[in-house]
Image (cartoon, helix red, strand yellow):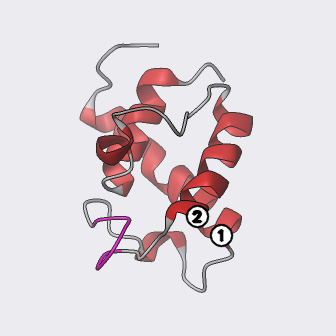
Amino acid sequence: MSDTPTPETVDALLPEVAALIVDALNLEMTPAEIEPDAPLFGDGLGLDSIDVLEIALVISKRYGFQLRSDNEDNTRIFASLRALTAHIARQRTK
């Protein structure tokens, strides 16, 4: 586990994390349709706080670390698919 994942590591993990989001939220889209740098909230993917809780649960099960609701970095962590994936690449234990 590295403090700063390489762009290649993040790019390689993007499809897996996108698939987790699509599956966890039963989205009517393919993982490839999620723009890596588009916002996950609002005008981007349009997620809400309940969606984030569901994503956090599947991430903790899949990657072996907790995303806490009281983390002051959550806005940055969940800013986009790429930001979330980079955070997973830094924190994962599985």
Q: Residue furthest front?
A: 70
For residue 55, above or below residue 45: above
Q: Are marks 1 and 2 in contact (CB under 8 Å)?
A: yes
Determine the residue positioned at 40% across, 33% down: 87
Give the tally of numbered discs: 2
**Residue 51 shows which numbered tag?**
2
Instruction: Magenta stretch: give its range.
Output: 39-44
Q: Is residue 6 left or right of residue 52?
A: left
Image coordinates for residue 28, horizontal then vertical, percent: 60, 86
Q: Earlier in the sequence, mark 1 or mark 2?
A: 1
Amino acid type at circle 2 is Asp
Quarter of the view holding residue 59: top right
Amino acid type at circle 1 is Leu
Quarter of the view holding residue 24: bottom right
Q: Residue furthest bottom?
A: 28
Is most of the magenta stretch helix, strand or loop?
Answer: loop
Q: Residues within 10 Å of mark 2 (few under 14, many from 20)?
A: some
Q: Which residue carries the number 1 mark?
A: 25
Q: Residues within 10 Å of mark 1 (few under 14, many from 20)?
A: some
Q: Give whichever of 38, 56 is nearer the camera.
A: 56
40 part of magenta stretch: yes
Image coordinates for residue 63, horizontal then vertical, percent: 64, 32
Determine the residue positioned at 69% across, 47% down: 58
Determine the residue positioned at 69% across, 45% down: 57
Report helix, strand or loop for mark 2. Answer: helix
**Residue 77 shows which numbered tag?**
none
Quarter of the view holding residue 22: bottom right
Q: Quadrant of the C terminus?
A: top right
Image coordinates for residue 8, horizontal then vertical, percent: 31, 36
Image coordinates for residue 41, horizontal then vertical, percent: 37, 68
46 part of magenta stretch: no
Report helix, strand or loop for mark 1. Answer: helix
